[in-house]
Amino acid sequence: MVSRRTINLYFTRVFLRSILNVFLICFAIIFLVDLVEQIREFSSHDDFSFMFAVKMALYRTPTIAEQVLPFAVLIGAIVAFLSLTRKLELAVTRSAGVSVWQFMQPALFVALLIGALASTAYNPLAVWLQQRSEQLELQEMSDGKEIRKTATKSIWFRQEGSLGESILSAKRTANHGLTLIGVTALVFEKDRTFKEQVDAVSANWQDGYWRLNDALITTADSPPERRAEYQLSTFFTKEQAQQQAESTGNTSFWQFPSTIEAARRAGLNTNRMRLNFQTHLARPLLFAAMVIIAATVSLKLTRLGGTGHMVLGGIGAGFVLYVLSELVGDFGSNGLLNPALAAWLPALIASVTGVTVLLYQEDG
């Protein structure tokens, strides 16, 4: 007779293979789309090469693919449950006296393991590769003519300096927020009258000022003037400069505790950083909730029929969970809800709801 340990190992392998296959398919699609985007953006550049585009796409894809991990777990678990059901392997397992809660244990173990690794290993690697892509583009392609317009979300912020106020925008950040790329600065006098606009390829934070590189200075009463360097005064500390970049996803899992503590000591709002950190901690539970949702729509397919409708229902439930997570996350980042509660609540609600549905389906 087949031992319980053998069954668990077999189910673990099935679920792990199914989830990884779905994720790798998503990864490949994202890579190809981003590769086409790299070619479209930089093909007219004198220094462009196909290998550069491939390298940039490989560096950028892990960060983008990280966002689809929950759906890869959901769809992979649905595919695995569907496969086991159609092959009657689950029916045979049930006939041997194994309950739904017992044969779900390997799937939950896989989900918890992937969730833990996604936060502790995959996320730091993805952030590091994203930073490498930004540095590579800045070194090889940012010549003042071509700065990526389709990067991570742009940032805007107002700052005070010893010489007056200024408003800065950047297409994206690098070096944990200490480097801005694709910069536009609106500079004001101390009496808050407009002085000049400065467009620069990049800006680097220094103690007491931003150093804008390859700057084009435009004023109302003189022709544009280009300078190799322009110093823009700022009262920003290093921690405040880094916080401007935090929302763009440039902070990895292991950097959050020190970053949050530094921001707290500087008197900055840490709600968004705490929310992101707690979201990483809640990932294993979120992935386990995805498996439970998959089980609720997959275990009785052969008896009830309507495979397509039930699978779409599972994907729809996952999408609703995603929207709920984003909505509650906005409450947490704006201080309307405790960040830890905002990060854990959607996964807890989904888990409890899924378990309740399974109890109704299996035990009446």
Image: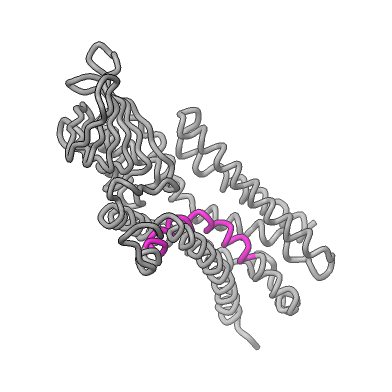
Image point (37%, 32%), residue name: 156
- Between 53 and 120, the one lying in front of the other is 53
Q: Quadrant of the C terminus?
A: bottom right
Q: Please give the count of numbered marks on the rendered protein.
A: 0
The extreme left residue here reads 207
- Between 165 and 261, the one lying in front of the other is 165
Image point (26%, 35%), residue name: 216
Residue 47 picture location, percent across and down = 30, 61
Residue 48 picture location, percent across and down = 34, 62
Residue 50 picture location, percent across and down = 39, 68
Quarter of the image where one finds residue 161: top left
Stretch of the chain drawn in magenta: 56-77
Q: Is residue 69 magenta?
A: yes
The extreme front residue here reads 223
Image point (40%, 34%), residue name: 271
- Between 298 and 199, the one lying in front of the other is 199
- Above or below, 292 against 199 in this view is below
Q: Is residue 337 magenta?
A: no
The answer to whether residue 81 is left or right of residue 329 is: right
- Between 162 and 147, the one lying in front of the other is 147
The extreme top residue here reads 191
Q: Quadrant of the N terminus?
A: bottom right
The answer to whether residue 207 is left or right of residue 58 is: left
The answer to whether residue 143 is left or right of residue 308 is: left
Image point (27%, 23%), residue name: 219
